[in-house]
Amino acid sequence: MDKKNSHTIVLPTVIHSSGQGQKPKLLVTAGPLEGREYMILKFPFTIGSGLSNELSIADSTVSRRHCEINLDEHGSLVINDLGSTNGTAIEGVKVTSARLQPNTEVQLGRTRIIVPLVQDRLELVMSARELFGKSIGRTPLIRHVFYLAENAAQCDSPVLLLGESGTGKEELAEDIHNESARRDKPFIVLDCNAFASLEHAHRELFGASDVKGALELASGGTLFVDSLDRLPADAQPLLLRALETRKDIRFIAASNQELGTMARDGAFYAPLFYAFAVIVIEMPALRRRKDDIALLLLSLAERLHVSEEIVRWCEQPSTIAFLRRYNWPGNIREMRLLLERLHSLGRIPADLGTFMRGDVKLEDENDSEESHFSVSADRPFKDLKNELIEAFERRYLSDLLARNAQNISLSARQAGIERAYLQRLVRKYGMRNTD
């Protein structure tokens, strides 16, 4: 691959602490200092835009003294927000104080850092592209995926795609096929979720007198084996035999399970795992690449041909801010389904949180009035208090706007609050301002 089309940053590989007293490091993965690594030589280790900090970042979205990294009584790393303007967030959730787990990503304004406990250096080569076929993104994790996919498209080696459901594994497999020399040949999908028995799997693979099998259909092209872990155990050696003998077919497989662990534990046919794991590409969960949400949202809206009203909604900063607070357990598939539901509805609900609860729960919302007031002292007082206040504000605003036909001025008068303050709350919670 042309070296001009990629560049490298260094990401940490986590090694569990051995008690040897290694100095922890942090790596900046986004922002003005992207790619730079810093040793934490003293505690507290302060971070901010001011020059007096141990790490000074020339980022206008970072406060002068934004946060600090310290050690707790157990010797674990913790991060404390120092009253910053934009807050300190972990995996998209703002925190005042939190323990840092290995490879935890922390966001300070536009800057993101990873702070492992102990680490070695691991080169993460990124493609210069932000678009690979139908896959799109500009964060380091997804551009590393593009780099691996570009290399995979230049050869016929088997590929194993790993990652949670909904992260776009099948789409990436087809993109690799479309960028390869086999692009004009068939791309055939074999879904192992549908197999009820060995006989069924054998029929789908090899065909029968009245139907062609996937191997025959994929001749000259690519066979994509989805949910490889669901292939019946008795059929796994048959697929291995086909992979080793059918040189006219490019094999790509996908799984949302830890196939390597399953193979070591005897829960999956190890020779088949190693045969596929020539090129392994892990698709990151959407919650690990929240900086791509705005890009993904507009890309999906364009592909789904949604209405202009929904497109305008996708472009609003308040929409992006609201969606970034959500953890997306269904990943990109869930985002696509959300847009499809909005398009079918023909409008944006006044309370998007309530609308989304038709499928899933927001991070900071509970399922019932009773659970809303469930309190546990195992979390910091300020964090829990803020969550309860936000849940109250969301429900109050939803009822208030509904009573006043979404009229902001009338709602503000009825609630006895300033109109500007009500508008800020509406933007904060992703509710429509139709006034």
Image (cartoon, rainbow, N blue to C red):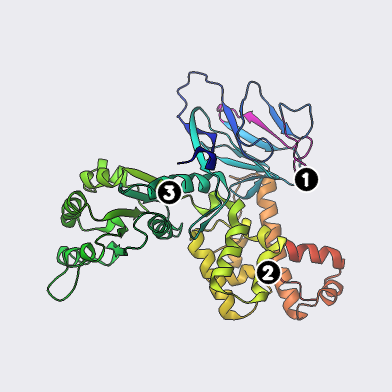
Q: Is residue 313 above or below residue 52?
A: below
Q: Earlier in the sequence, mark 2 or mark 1?
A: 1
Amino acid type for the residue under numbered disc 1: Thr
Q: Main secondary structure of the magenta part?
A: loop
Amino acid type for the residue under numbered disc 2: Trp
Seen from the viewer's position, the closer of residues 226 and 164 is 226
In this view of the protein, can residue 176 be seen by the observer?
yes
Q: Nearer the viewer, mark 3 or mark 2?
A: 3
Seen from the viewer's position, the closer of residues 253 and 194 is 253
Q: Is residue 72 above or below residue 303?
A: above
Q: Circle 3 is placed at which residue position?
A: 149
Q: Circle 2 is placed at which residue position?
A: 313
Q: Position of residue 385 (x, y in %)?
A: 69, 52
**Residue 72 is inside the magenta segment:** yes
Q: Which residue corresponds to the image point at 63% horizontal and 21% vertical from the top-left?
A: 41
Q: Secondary structure at mark 1?
A: loop
Region rendered in magenta:
56-76
- Give residue 392's quadrant in the image: bottom right
- Give residue 398's quadrant in the image: bottom right
- Crowdedness of circle 1 by 10 Å Cα count: few (<14), some, many (20+)? some
Q: Is residue 278 toward the left or the right of residue 322 in the image?
A: left
In this view of the protein, can residue 348 be seen by the observer?
no
| Residue 184 badge | none
Assign the C terminus to one quadrant of the image.
Answer: bottom right
Label 2, label 1: how many angstroms apart (C-alpha)?
26 Å
Q: Circle 1 is placed at which residue position?
A: 85
**Residue 114 is inside the magenta segment:** no
Q: Position of residue 52 (x, y in %)?
A: 78, 26
